[in-house]
Image (cartoon, rainbow, N blue to C red):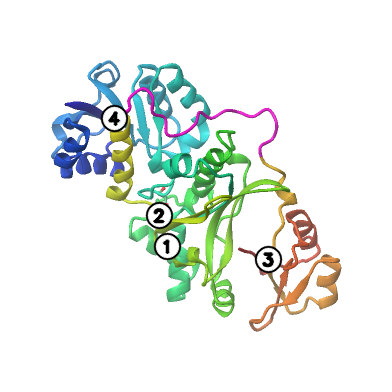
């Protein structure tokens, strides 16, 4: 019998206990022994839960029990989860987590503690929920230089944008709908301001850079709060969808990582991911494009990835780490975002003259958009690769009113 503990009995923690119970026979067959949840650490009581008898508020019952070698952390956040993760790793227990905030903030330190204590800190569920992405990147794609990652990695914002596109709802109405369905948090800022996606792309970028840590808080990030129904009209006329993309690029000019809403052609595979689904396209210099698609959140889907990690940990206790150890690089790992080449759809009031646009963006390719709503003019800038974020920011300062700027993927 292999015993584990779960820290935090919220949606995902409960899903982990359920998946282990639901698939116990095949898990036992695979591991050669039964996998059991021995303790669940939480400050709350769960009298109605079939796992109520396992719940404890005493942390020593987890951290001081030599019989528990793997701990699942599904508390979330970077405070108590951080303390408990350090405690577990220092005690030589492998920690499996879905906590992207903690991994992206303290991953370097936590992986070092794991290494020093001959255990592992693993987090397949931290990006893409149930979608396998961390292990495939680290293992199956290890022979490649990762040239690009482009992902829809936040289900809540994808749901909101899908609603806006399909039902014509405005942002506020679509957000309310997402909240009523339980997708968005009561405080939805981490999702709609792009912070959740920022954390996830920092994790993927760090893996793509063989462990050179990419700090999420330094990434250029634009959320979806300024997307309007008018933007959706333009997208439709351009045969495109608006998607919040988290992007990593490693080109000759430099490496970049950022999060922003993009117009994605409906012919591109990423445009197929709607509602709460996630999709991540990874481009390797040997394999070309590979695409990962599935449920990026939710109880059983996320638990599926956690349980996979737990089984991996049990099978390879002290020599596993499916992620290379992370480190703080002495030189900057990313180039300044100002150097990143972009092309954008720019919407302005119709009172702005063509000359004013040409003056704001000298020597930048500029073509009128095929569609213009009443009282507006719209142009596509930078189609020839002659615009970067610095020139865009300077040019935009020339206008008193801007209706929207959306990057084109
Ligand atoms: N809030 C996240 C999302 C949960 O909507 O994708 C999964 O990380």
Q: Earlier in the sequence, mark 2 or mark 4?
A: 2
- The label number, if any, that marks residue 159 in the structure image: 1
In the displayed structure, 160 sits above or below 132; it is below
Label 2, on which residue? 184
**Residue 184 image-quadrant placement:** bottom left
Write the start and end of the magenta stretch as one range: 314-333
Q: Residues within 10 Å of mark 2 (few under 14, many from 20)?
A: many
Tell me what residue is drawn at x 59 percent, y 33 percent: 212
Cβ of mark 2 under 8 Å from ligand 1: the answer is: yes
Q: Distance between the Cα atoms at labels 4 and 1?
A: 37 Å
Q: Tags 3 and 1 in contact by the CB under 8 Å rule?
A: no
Tell me what residue is drawn at x 55 percent, y 44 percent: 144
Q: Nearer the viewer, residue 399 or 259?
A: 259
Q: Earlier in the sequence, mark 4 or mark 1?
A: 1
Label 4, on which residue? 315
Q: Nearer the viewer, mark 3 or mark 1?
A: 3
Residue 97 place in picture, x, y as percent: 37, 35
Q: Nearer the viewer, mark 3 or mark 2?
A: 3
Q: Nearer the viewer, residue 183 or 92?
A: 92
């Amino acid at each position: 019998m292999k015993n584990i503990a779960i820290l935090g009995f919220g949606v995902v923690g409960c899903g982990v206990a359920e998946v282990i119970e639901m698939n116990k026979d095949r898990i036992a067959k695979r591991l050669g022994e039964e996998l059991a949840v021995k303790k669940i650490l939480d400050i709350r009581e769960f009298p109605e839960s079939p796992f109520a008898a396992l719940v404890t508020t005493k942390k020593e019952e987890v951290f001081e029990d030599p019989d528990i070698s793997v701990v699942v952390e599904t508390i979330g956040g970077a405070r108590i989860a951080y303390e408990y993760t350090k405690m577990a790793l220092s005690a030589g227990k492998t920690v499996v987590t879905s906590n992207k905030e903690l991994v992206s903030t303290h991953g370097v330190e936590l992986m070092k503690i794991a290494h020093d204590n001959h255990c592992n800190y693993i987090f397949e569920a931290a990006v893409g929920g149930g979608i396998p992405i961390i292990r495939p990147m680290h293992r199956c794609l290890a022979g490649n230089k990762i040239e690009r990652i482009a992902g829809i990695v936040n289900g809540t914002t994808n749901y909101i944008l899908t609603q806006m596109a399909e039902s014509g709802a405005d942002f506020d109405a679509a957000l309310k709908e997402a909240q009523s369905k339980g997708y968005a948090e009561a405080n939805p800022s981490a999702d709609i301001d792009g912070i959740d996606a920022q954390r996830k792309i920092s994790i993927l970028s760090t893996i793509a850079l063989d462990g050179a840590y990419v700090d999420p808080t330094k990434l250029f990030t634009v959320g979806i709060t300024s997307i309007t129904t008018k933007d959706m009209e333009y997208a439709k006329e351009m045969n495109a969808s608006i998607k919040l993309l988290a992007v990593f690029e490693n080109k000759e000019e430099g490496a970049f990582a950022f999060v922003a809403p993009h117009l994605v052609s409906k012919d591109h595979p990423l445009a197929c991911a709607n509602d709460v689904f996630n999709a991540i396209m990874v481009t390797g210099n040997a394999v070309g494009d590979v695409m990962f698609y599935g449920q990026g959140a939710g109880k059983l889907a996320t638990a599926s990835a956690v349980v996979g990690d737990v089984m991996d940990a049990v099978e390879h206790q002290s020599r596993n780490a499916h992620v290379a150890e992370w480190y703080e690089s002495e030189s900057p790992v990313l180039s300044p975002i100002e150097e990143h080449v972009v092309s954008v759809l720019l919407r302005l009031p119709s009172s702005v003259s063509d000359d004013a646009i040409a003056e704001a963006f000298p020597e930048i390719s500029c073509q009128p958009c095929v569609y213009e709503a009443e009282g507006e003019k719209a142009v596509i800038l930078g189609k020839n690769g002659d615009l970067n974020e610095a020139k865009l920011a300077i040019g935009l300062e020339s206008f008193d009113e801007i209706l929207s700027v959306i990057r084109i993927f």
